[in-house]
Image: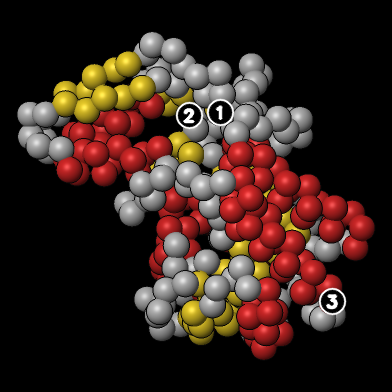
Amino acid sequence: MSRVLIIGIGGFSGTYMQEYIKNKTLYNSYDFFGIGLKKVCRSDFIKYKKIDVTKEKDLEDFICECRPDYIINFCGEYSNVSFEQMKILNLFVTNNIINIVLKKGITIKKLLVIGSAAEYGTTNHFPIQENKTLNPNGDYGATKKMQTEAALEAFQKYNFPVVIARTFNLHGNGISENLLLGKYEKLIQNALDGSEISLSNSESIRDFIHIKDAVEMYWNILIYGTSGEVYNVCTGKGKRVIEMIEKLVLLSGKKIKIICKENSIADKEIKKSIGDCNKINNLMSAVK
C-alpha cells in the first residue's frame, strides 16, 4: 500500500484529517505515518512519532525511515511571533522536506503544502482566482507566499511533485484562538451571561469554510491534484464577520451583546476576501 506521511498531525487540521481518514476507512488502502509535538496520536491506525520538525536531522531520519509516497505538511505559524520565527514553520520546514526528498533520492508521488488566502492581500476583484498576483499585507501572508514560491520553484527546476492548497478562513470546533473565529469563540466561552463583547471591523467579509470540508479537499488535492498547481480551498461565498460571531453567540446559549467598533479599519486590514472555487469544485466533481 502507498504510504502517507502527515506532518503536524496533532494540530487542528491534522486532527480533522485523522477523523476523515477514519470515516472513509482510508487506512484499508494506505499506510499512515504521523509526526508532531504531542506525546501520542489519538488514532491507532497512525504510526506516530513525536518529532520537532524544525530539527532537520530528526525530520530527515524519519522521512528516510518511512519513505512515504505522499506527504502532507500541516505545519504553520500564524500567531504573534517575529517574522523570522514565522518563517521557520511557514517556509523552512517545506524547504527541508523538499531538500531531504531530493538529496536522499526518495521517490514521492505528491507533497501537499498548505498556503493561505492571506497571500493574495487586498484586491477589488472577486472572486479571487488562483492566478491572481500575490501581494500579501502582513508577515503571515508574506511567509506563506515565500513557501508557495519555494514549492513552485522546486516543481519548475526539478519536476518535484508538489501541490498547494490555498486555504481561506477556517472554522470548526477546536480552532486555534489565534485565528479569527477561535478568538471570539474563546471570548464567548469566557463571557458571563448578559455581558458584552467588542467586535472590530464587523462588516469585513470573509470566505469561511468548515475544517471538515477543507480536509476533504486537502485529501483530494493530494491524491488527484495536478503537480505544480494551486487550488483555492474555499466556498466561493462571502459572509460578514458579524454574522459568524452572532452564530457563535447563539450556539453558546448566552445572552451576549456584541458592540461593533467600526472606527478605522487599519490600512493592512483586508476588508473583503472571497475565493474562486471553480478549480477545486471541478477537481472534487471529477473524483466523485
The residue positioned farthest toward the top in the image shown: 263
188 vs 264, nearest the viewer: 264
Q: Secondary structure at mark 1?
A: loop
Q: CA distance from mark 3 to mark 1?
A: 39 Å
Q: CA distance from mark 2 to mark 3?
A: 41 Å
Q: Secondary structure at mark 2?
A: strand
Q: What kind of residue is marked 1?
A: Ile
Callout 3: 10 Å neighbours few (<14), some, many (20+)?
few
193 vs 70, nearest the viewer: 193
87 vs 179, nearest the viewer: 87
Residue 44 drawn at (x, y percent)? 41, 83
Q: Earlier in the sequence, mark 2 or mark 3?
A: 3
> Which residue is rendered at x = 36% and y = 22% of the image?
200
Judging by the rendered image, the residue that carries numbered circle 1 is: 274
- Vertical arrangement, residue 176 with respect to residue 123, above or below: below
Which corner quadrant holds the C terminus?
Answer: bottom right
- Vertical arrangement, residue 54 with respect to residue 126, above or below: below
> Which residue is rendered at x = 48% and y = 29% of the image?
206
Does the CB distance between marks 2 and 3 fall below 8 Å?
no
> Which residue is rendered at x = 52% and y = 66% of the image?
8
Does the CB distance between marks 1 and 2 fall below 8 Å?
yes
Tell me the tag on residue 103: 3
- Vertical arrangement, residue 262 with respect to residue 131, above or below: above
Q: Secondary structure at mark 3?
A: helix
Q: CA distance from mark 1 to mark 2?
A: 6 Å
Q: Earlier in the sequence, mark 3 or mark 1?
A: 3
Which corner quadrant holds the N terminus?
Answer: bottom right
Tell me the tag on residue 206: 2
Circle 3 or circle 1, nearest the eye: 3
Q: What kind of residue is marked 3?
A: Lys
Residue 127 drawn at (x, y percent)? 62, 25
